[in-house]
Amino acid sequence: MSKVVLITGGSSGIGKSIGEFLSEKGFKVYGTSRSPEHYTSSKFPILKLDVKDASTISSCVQSLLELEDRLDVLINNAGVGITGPIEEIPLDEMKSHFDTNFFGPLQVIKAVLPQMRKQQNGLIINVTSIAGYMGLPYRGIYSASKGALELVTEAYRMELKSFNIKMTNVAPGDFATNIAAGRFHAPIQEDSPYKVPYGNTLKLMDSHVDFGKDPKIMAEAIFKVINTPDPKIHYKVGEFIQKVSIVLKRILPDKVYEKMLLNHYKL
């Protein structure tokens, strides 16, 4: 029997690549979007879901269960980016960001757990970010939201263990997607003390995405995780240097690591 997979944010970028790859492998894939009517030509069904709207989450899960009567894998992929000097990002934008990247995935998890508990099995994959392992300049709020999801997964795994429900994180590095176009950019203000360093860092971040890896690599990694009987807690998918940076953070003195980041971003 083909496994049933739900991918939030499955209409574009990494989510779309994962959905297409898993569909080719024989999975029954359902993606989600706030505006599914825009994706009628998708290679797999797109259901309506907004991770910031609990009613759409409940309706989506209910619709899926009416179609399939089970859910084997949830891939919490929906997310947004945010950049800017922390001092200059409006508080409402910070809260909105966490609603999407942190509280949103938690709400989707809560919606699928009763069914997975009923089945006595299930797998939840939270797509986080290598940026969630460190506080990056002018990406601090994004790092914080992804880091929070990484940590809450560690706790959730232990709470779900007795129900045979598994949970893991997959943290991508930079991939060639449209995330830069969709993220919130604090404007570069002419009178801002951060004008020059923030502007330069923004160009560097955008270039990383523009020359990022093919998101199919992420899809292949997710496929391997799904087929792993006992998934690890954390997976990292990206350039060698990006994965090494996490190891260096663990072994280097804090100020040495901070200096390394400052040199990288030319700050």
Image (cartoon, rainbow, N blue to C red):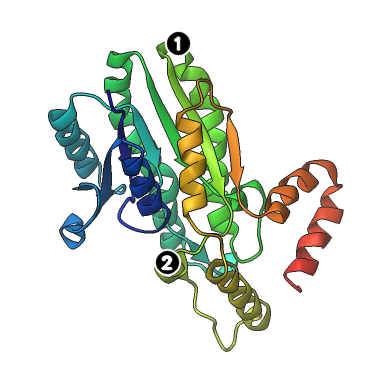
Residue 76, horizontal then vertical, whole percent: 40, 41
Residue 225, horizontal then vertical, whole percent: 50, 33
Disc 1 or 2, which lies upstream in sequence?
1
Which mark is on residue 59? Answer: none
Q: Residues within 10 Å of mark 1 (few under 14, many from 20)?
A: few
Tell me which residue sits at (52%, 50%) in the image. Answer: 217
User: Of 208 and 154, which appears nearest the observer?
Assistant: 208
Residue 67, horizontal then vertical, whole percent: 14, 32
Real-space CA distance between mark 1 and mark 2, rounded to the nearest whole angstrom:
39 Å
The residue at which mark 2 appears reads as 178
Residue 54, picture quadrant: top left
Q: Which quarter of the figure is the C terminus placed in?
A: bottom right
Specify the amino acid type for callout 2: Asn
Determine whether 167 is above or below 101 in the image: above
Q: Is residue 34 left or right of residue 164?
A: left
Q: Is residue 178 left or right of residue 258?
A: left
User: Of 152 and 73, which appears nearest the observer?
Assistant: 73
Residue 196, picture quadrant: bottom right
The residue at which mark 1 appears reads as 162
User: Of 231 and 35, which appears nearest the observer?
Assistant: 231
